[in-house]
Image (cartoon, grey):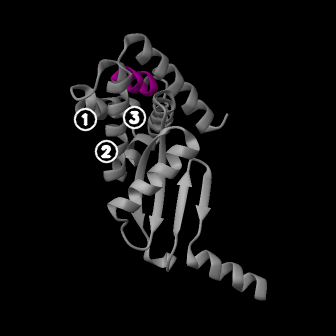
């Protein structure tokens, strides 16, 4: 079974438990915090996925790092996954949980990549357009990539709108070949 399917099932179970206990927001904050720790310290994620490191050691690391800083419902999934030798799925579960949370709250995460940082007015315009198209509250993440030359790349879930000059030049190059 693919890891993403397993991660979704664990995330869904955790989401249902958090909903039952009325702590969905707290658990989502904890999962975002966990992802941030993993993103800032890739070695932490490598240790969790390393089959040579004993599961008791991994649980001890998770306890020391998170037990006092996260809700008990959140820590319960850490404990269960460590006992089942599935701690390598924690990051994927955190991502899936965040998707479930956003879906429940009507939040659409959008990434826009441009050559230069957007102005406040441009951000507001993109947010308004996407909110109108999706009917959801938009959370806009901005990235800067000078290799685009001009234009933008707008990513909404699995959909990507690429109006960059780099893409148009590549298309022109392919049509001339």
Determine which residue is flagged by label 3: 54
Determine which residue is flagged by label 1: 65
Q: Which of the two discs, 1 and 3, labels the residue nearer the N terminus?
A: 3
Estimate the x, y position of residue 69 in percent, counting from the top left.
23, 29
Q: Is residue 165 above or below residue 57?
A: below
Dot 3, crowdedness within 10 Å: few (<14), some or many (≥20)? Answer: few
Cα separation, mark 3 vs mark 2, equals 21 Å
Q: Which of 155/129 is in front?
A: 129
Front tag of 2 and 1:
2
- The quadrant where residue 118 appears: bottom left
Cα separation, mark 2 vs mark 1, equals 10 Å
Dot 2, crowdedness within 10 Å: few (<14), some or many (≥20)? Answer: some
Residue in view at x 77 percent, y 88 percent: 176
Cα separation, mark 1 vs mark 3, equals 17 Å
Estimate the x, y position of residue 175 in percent, counting from the top left.
77, 83
* Magenta-colored stretch includes residue 114: no
Q: Furthest-top residue in view?
A: 20
Q: In this view, does 89 lie above or below 38?
A: above
- The quadrant where residue 139 appears: top left
Front tag of 3 and 2:
2
Dot 2 and dot 1 residues touching (CB under 8 Å): yes
Q: Which of the two discs, 3 and 2, labels the residue nearer the N terminus?
A: 2
Determine which residue is flagged by label 2: 37
Residue in view at x 32 percent, y 25 percent: 26
Residue 99 — which label? none
């Amino acid at each position: 079974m693919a890891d993403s399917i397993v991660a979704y099932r664990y995330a869904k179970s955790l989401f249902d438990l958090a909903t039952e206990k009325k702590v969905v927001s707290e658990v989502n904050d904890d999962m975002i915090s966990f992802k941030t720790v993993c993103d800032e310290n890739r070695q932490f994620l490598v240790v969790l996925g390393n089959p040579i490191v004993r599961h008791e050691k991994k649980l001890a690391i998770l306890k020391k790092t998170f037990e006092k800083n996260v809700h008990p419902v959140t820590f319960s999934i850490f404990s269960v996954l460590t006992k089942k030798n599935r701690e390598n799925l924690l990051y994927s579960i955190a991502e899936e949980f965040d998707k479930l949370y956003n879906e429940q709250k009507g939040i659409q995460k959008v990434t826009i990549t441009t050559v230069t940082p957007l102005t406040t007015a441009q951000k507001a315009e993109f947010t308004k357009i996407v909110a109108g198209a999706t009917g959801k509250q938009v959370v806009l993440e901005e990235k800067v990539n000078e290799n685009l030359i001009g234009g933008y790349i707008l990513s909404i879930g699995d959909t990507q709108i690429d109006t960059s000059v780099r893409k148009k030049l590549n298309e022109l190059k392919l049509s001339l070949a």
